[in-house]
Amino acid sequence: MRRVLSVLSLLLLLFGCAVAPVQEMSDARQAIQAAREAGAAIRSPQVLEEAERLLDAAERSLEVGDYSRARELAVAAHRKAIEARERAGYGDESAPPDTL
């Protein structure tokens, strides 16, 4: 009985840590949408595209069950989206649009 409880405790510990990053994914999606609405597609397209690429990679990681990597990528996508939104909000002299 003691052994069974030990094994169950270990399994709960292992699987309890592997929780899908639902909030992080949602935060990234919302930040990307806010960046688009702020005009980042025109004023900061490269940064916005990077945020979208990171979110896509997070979604792929989520699909294969790599929750840790998905969380990492979603947080990075969120940060990039915020950067894109901030760049979109500045005047020309403060933060020039991305160039190719």
Image (tube, rainbow, N blue to C red):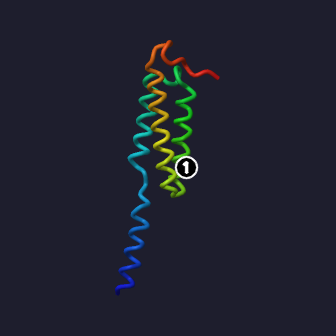
The disc labelled 1 sits on which kind of residue? Arg
SS type, badge 1: helix
What residue appears at the point 41 percent right and 45 percent down from the top-left corner? Answer: 24
Residue 33 placed where, x, y %? 44, 32
Residue pushed farthest front?
A: 94
- Judge from the rendering whether residue 16 lies leftward or rightward of residue 81; answer left or right: left
What residue appears at the point 35 percent right and 80 percent down from the top-left corner? Answer: 5
Residue 79 placed where, x, y %? 46, 36
Quadrant showing the N terminus: bottom left
- Judge from the rendering whether residue 82 lies leftward or rightward of residue 44; answer left or right: left
User: Could you tell me how many numbered marks the image carries?
Assistant: 1
Q: Check the image and report above or below for 98 versus 13.
A: above
Q: Check the image and report above or below for 62 versus 54.
A: below
Residue pushed farthest right?
A: 100
- Judge from the rendering whether residue 97 lies leftward or rightward of residue 7; answer left or right: right
Residue 16 placed where, x, y %? 39, 64
What residue appears at the point 42 percent right and 51 percent down from the top-left corner? Answer: 21
Quadrant showing the C terminus: top right
- The residue pinned by badge 1 equals 60
Badge 1: few (under 14), some or many (20 or more) residues near its Cα, within 10 Å?
Answer: some
Residue pushed farthest bottom?
A: 1
Residue 92 placed where, x, y %? 50, 13
